[in-house]
């Protein structure tokens, strides 16, 4: 399968509008915090980078525009296609605009402040987090609007959050609550921290019995909302959930659950539960992973008129790199191809280090380098060690991973020898990014134009 690394320039784009429901500069990163990443020194901490680049700053190395294959990089090396990343960023921007959605992509996918900055430039409302550590990374790089899709009951994390909110009037934060006990713990911790600003919360509706987190019934949600109303440290601003956990998910089941979520928002509004909102503040209504955002767009298009405007917040994160496995099969664009198509951006290059039989080979990449929790890597291309030519990986299949080796089965007549590089597509972005601290961003001809820093 042909899979160009990229034909575009590095991640550099002009500022663009912040997107639906975002005030001026609401989600922007602090330019200096992201720019400072280029000042980090290259050394042994970063896999695959050229040994002779030791001591250079990341920015200086990027300016050299080395070639991934001939510029001194060691194998294995993970590359991201600049063209594919840029195309994916643009596609979700236009998709959200077309459907009247605000967009807070889940940052846990990449944990890359440079990509956060690009997502914000492409209209993102803010960045979603899963745990407080991720929020700390976001704040260190200037993210001003964070949606944390989990209940936070750690008193140390809540003390830090209270300090951030008190110190920065422009910092906007909201997180889930799904239990009366959680509300009690949050209130206790925030009062102990002397918080002067209430923490905004949304009640999480669970996706069904046996699903993940979230209050299971509308009555449970109401009890949580009552608990929030009884304390001064929290403020109810909306409802949310994750449709990806709907049991035996199908388009019909997912839409039914999303309609329950919309109805919950409407019932809360009718009961005056959002009366703490002031001025032009909107009710938050949030859902949307990477598998069902078409259903979210469809159901959220029919939200009834409430007492104030509604911010319909989508949170999909895997789109930024997409993949060659799990999300290639699950992406909603398979169901709505007229709306566009995401492009897989990952390619892991590894070198054949052993060819013991005509049917077997081993490469020097394993579980420490490649995602393997959902699918094994997919062999796509071979680069000859003799002349640098690239050909399809015909008759070559990755069958297993050890810690540092990839097991490869080959047809008896497959053209492959020790020293060749195999380019592999990966499945599941979230467990691909987290194995690499500095990832080359690469053009189609192999030119490395930038390096993406991750913080896991």
Image (tube, rainbow, N blue to C red):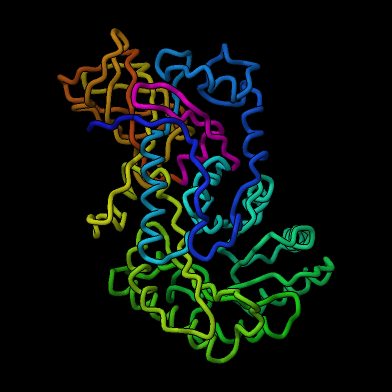
Q: Quadrant of the N terminus?
A: top left
Foreground of the two, 217 or 446: 446
| 427 in the magenta segment | no
Query: In percent of the image, x 46 and y 27: which residue is there?
Result: 404
The image position of residue 247, as x and y in percent, is 36, 70
Q: Quadrant of the C terminus?
A: top right
Foreground of the two, 308 or 434: 308
Residue placed farthest to the top in the image?
386
Residue placed farthest to the left in the image?
413
Vertical arrangement, residue 16 with respect to residue 48, above or below: below
Query: In percent of the image, x 62 and y 22: which residue is there?
Result: 42
Q: Taking 447 as reference, is 29 left or right?
A: right
Query: In percent of the image, x 48 and y 39: which residue is there?
Result: 13
Q: Taking 368 as reference, is 85 left or right?
A: left
Vertical arrangement, residue 249 with respect to residue 73, above or below: below
**Location of residue 148 (image quadrant):** bottom right
Foreground of the two, 48 or 120: 120
Q: Taking 230 as reference, is 287 left or right?
A: left
Vertical arrangement, residue 254 with respect to residue 224, above or below: above
What span is colored magenta in the figure? 430-456
Foreground of the two, 140 or 214: 140
**Location of residue 268 (image quadrant):** bottom right
The image position of residue 83, as x and y in percent, is 37, 35
């Amino acid at each position: 399968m042909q899979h160009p690394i990229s034909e575009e320039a590095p991640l550099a784009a002009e500022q663009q509008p912040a997107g639906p429901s975002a005030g001026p500069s609401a989600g922007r990163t602090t330019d200096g915090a992201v720019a400072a990443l280029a000042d980090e020194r290259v050394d042994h901490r970063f896999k695959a980078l050229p040994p002779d680049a030791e001591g250079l700053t990341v920015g200086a190395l990027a300016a050299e525009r080395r070639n991934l294959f001939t510029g001194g990089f060691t194998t294995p090396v993970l590359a991201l296609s600049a063209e594919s990343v840029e195309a994916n960023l643009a596609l979700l921007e236009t998709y959200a605009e077309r459907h009247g959605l605000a967009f807070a992509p889940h940052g846990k996918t990449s944990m890359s402040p440079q990509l956060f900055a690009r997502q914000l430039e492409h209209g993102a409302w803010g960045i979603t987090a899963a745990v407080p550590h991720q929020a700390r990374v976001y704040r260190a790089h200037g993210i001003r609007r964070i949606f944390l899709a989990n209940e936070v009951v750690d008193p140390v994390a809540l003390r830090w959050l209270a300090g951030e909110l008190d110190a920065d009037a422009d910092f906007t934060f909201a997180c889930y609550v799904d239990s009366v006990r959680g509300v009690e713990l949050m209130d206790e911790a925030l009062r102990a921290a002397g918080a002067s600003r209430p923490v905004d919360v949304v009640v999480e509706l669970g996706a069904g019995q046996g699903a993940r987190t979230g209050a299971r019934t509308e009555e449970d949600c109401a009890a949580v909302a009552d608990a929030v109303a009884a304390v001064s440290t929290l403020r109810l601003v909306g409802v949310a959930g994750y449709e990806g956990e709907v049991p035996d998910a199908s388009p019909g089941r997912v839409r039914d659950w999303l309609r329950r979520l919309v109805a919950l928002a409407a019932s809360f509004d009718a009961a005056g539960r959002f009366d703490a909102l002031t001025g032009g503040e909107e009710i938050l209504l949030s859902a949307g992973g990477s598998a069902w955002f078409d259903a979210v767009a469809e159901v959220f298009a029919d939200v009834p008129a409430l007492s104030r405007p509604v911010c319909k917040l989508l949170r999909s994160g895997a789109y930024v790199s997409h993949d060659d496995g799990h999300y290639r099969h699950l992406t909603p664009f398979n169901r709505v191809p007229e709306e566009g198509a995401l492009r897989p951006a990952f390619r892991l290059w590894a070198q054949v280090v052993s060819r013991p039989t005509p049917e077997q080979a081993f490469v020097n990449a394993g579980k420490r380098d490649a995602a393997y929790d959902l699918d094994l890597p997919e062999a796509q291309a071979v680069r000859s060690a003799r002349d640098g030519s690239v050909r399809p990986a015909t008759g070559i299949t990755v069958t297993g991973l050890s810690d540092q080796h990839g097991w490869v089965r080959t047809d008896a007549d497959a053209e492959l020898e020790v020293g060749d590089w195999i380019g592999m597509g990966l499945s599941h972005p979230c467990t691909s990014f987290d194995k690499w601290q500095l990832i080359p961003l690469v053009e189609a001809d192999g030119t490395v134009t930038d390096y993406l820093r991750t913080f896991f």
